[in-house]
Structure formats: structure tokens, C-alpha cells
Amino acid sequence: MKKHLIILSLIAVCVVGGFYIFMKNDSAQSSKDSYASGYLTGEYFIDGETISLSDGYFEKEIAPDSASKTVVQYFGNEAIGDISGDGVSDVVFLLTRVDGGSGTFYYAVAAVRTGDTYKGTNAVLLGDRIAPQSTEISNGVASINYAIRKDSDPLSEQPSLGVTLRLSIIDSVLSVVK
């Protein structure tokens, strides 16, 4: 009987301990996920206009009482690394902008980490109806890989010409580098 009581006590300790470890790790992961995605809410600057993303989304009417809207939203293709040169990891990702017409314009932006928050940069236009491929950060430079159409191709043609745009933070501005 004593032996069973000891075994049951050990099982109870293991279950409680395991539950505690699981909850601690789950809570830490949830906090990490929330911190990591903090760049999806903040201000970015597209064509001289301040865009305030909320969970990766922004919408405004183009004109009062108009059904047409400007919609800017998180597309993805994010890369994490130091693009600002301060030794702290930042995030580079793509946004799309639709202004009520048939085009979908793609932009690259950076979220520069400052303490526990991110500060959004200006947006760099990649093009209309492109085919994003990948984004990488290495040695302070973000490489945005995507496909475009040849100048002679109609917009109905699928993008097939590979392009790489290299970006870096220069004087607090997201800039194209050679």
C-alpha cells in the first residue's frame, strides 16, 4: 500500500511539473509570437502618405461617399536580419496596395527594431502585378527577388523575367543600393 502511495505521489508530481513546464513554454512562445509580429501594426510611408497598419491591414475611402477604397495589406515574404546596421534584427517584408483599379502594386518596407517596438520605414515600389519570390537579408542588405513582365509583354502575360532589388537603410531611409 505504501508503495502504491509513493508511485501515485510521483505520478502526480510529474503531471503537475509537466503541466507547469508546458504552460511556461506556451506562454513564452505566445509572447514571442506577439513580439515578433508587432511590426504588422505601425506606420509606414507609401508615396508620401502615412499608412497606419493594424494587424497588417489599412483601408480608406478614395473620396467621400465613394465605393472605391485604397487597401494596403501585408503580403509576406518577410526576412529577419539587421538592415539598419545597429546589430539588432529588423524585418523586411512586402505590402500590396490596391486603389480601386485593376492593378495590385507591391512595395518593400522595413520594420526597424527599436527596443521592444518597431519603427516603419518608407516603402519602395517593386511594381504592378509582379510575382514575388523571396526576401533575404545579408550583411545589412535586403535582397528582394521577384519576376516582372518584359516591356513587350501585355499585362495579361505571366511575369517571367527575374529581378533582384537590393535595399538598405541609409540615413534612416529605406534605399536602393547597387
Image (tube, rainbow, N blue to C red):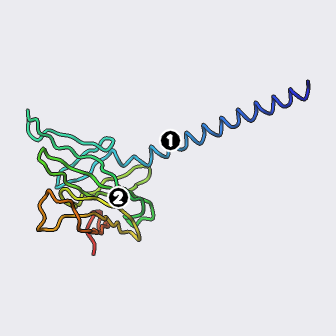
In the orientation shown, which residue stands out farthest toward the front?
A: 157
Q: In the shown orientation, is residue 156 left or right of residue 164? A: left
Residue 37: x, y in percent?
Answer: 40, 47
Give above or below for 37 relative to 13. Answer: below
Q: In the shown orientation, is residue 40 left or right of residue 18? A: left
Q: Residue at x 31, y 46 (%)?
A: 42
Tell me the quarter of the picture where residue 20 sits: top right
Q: In the shown orientation, is residue 4 left or right of residue 128? A: right
Give above or below for 60 relative to 169. Answer: above
| Pick the front one: 56 or 86 | 56
Tell me the quarter of the picture where residue 16 sits: top right
Give above or below for 119 relative to 83. Answer: above
Residue 12: x, y in percent?
Answer: 76, 30
| Pick the front one: 169 or 103 | 103
Q: Quadrant of the C terminus?
A: bottom left
Tell me the quarter of the picture where residue 112 sits: bottom left
On residue 92, which mark appears?
A: 2
On residue 30, which mark appears?
A: 1
In the orientation shown, which residue stands out farthest toward the bottom?
A: 178
Q: In the shown orientation, is residue 102 left or right of residue 32? A: left
Specify the amino acid type for callout 2: Val
Secondary structure at numbered mark 2: strand
Residue 146: x, y in percent?
Answer: 28, 63
Specify the amino acid type for callout 1: Ser
| Pick the front one: 67 or 46 | 67
Q: Residues within 10 Å of mark 1 (few under 14, many from 20)?
A: few
Secondary structure at numbered mark 1: helix
Q: Residues within 10 Å of mark 2 (few under 14, many from 20)?
A: many
